[in-house]
Image (tube, helix red, strand yellow):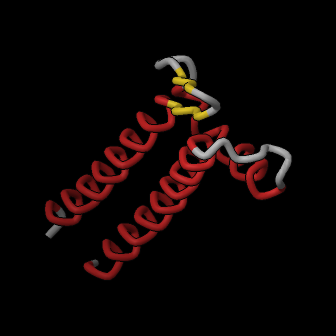
Amino acid sequence: MFRTRNIINSVINIILTIVEALLLFRLILKLLAANEAAAFVRWIYETSEPLLSPFEGMFPTVVNSGVVVEMSTLFAIMVYALVGYLLIAIVDAIYRASK
């Protein structure tokens, strides 16, 4: 049972790491005003868009001298981290209760 819990927690951590990395890349590319015509930049924006859709319009996007700070992306990073932490805590609680 301990092994199953570790596998589930590892899967949650892997998924969370991928989501957080995509959002972090998006945030950095927007901050650096990366060229959207570049294939990698376009791929990051297109791949991270569904992850941001629940948070669109919640906060203003700050633009200053071509530098873009997407506050929605920052908020999404925090929310996904919290959700991952809560999922791991729930899995741990379930396995502790079943002992």
Please state if 14 lies on the left or on the right of 65 as rendered: left
Tag count:
0
Residue closer to the observer: 13 or 38 = 38
Residue at position x 76%, y 58% from top? 40
- The image quarter in which residue 12 lies: bottom left
Residue closer to the observer: 97 or 57 = 57
Please state if 79 lies on the left or on the right of 97 as rendered: right
Tell me residue 84's x, y (percent). 36, 52
Residue at position x 53%, y 31% from top? 70
- Quadrant containing the N terminus in the rendered view: bottom left
Please state if 40 lies on the left or on the right of 64 as rendered: right
Residue at position x 55%, y 49% from top? 28
Tell me residue 17's x, y (percent). 47, 62
Residue at position x 54%, y 23% from top? 61
Q: Which residue is farthest front?
A: 65
- The image quarter in which residue 36 lies: top right
Tell me residue 58's x, y (percent). 48, 18
Residue closer to the observer: 4 or 10 = 10
Tell me residue 44's x, y (percent). 69, 51
Please state if 37 lies on the left or on the right of 98 as rendered: right
- Quadrant containing the C terminus in the rendered view: bottom left
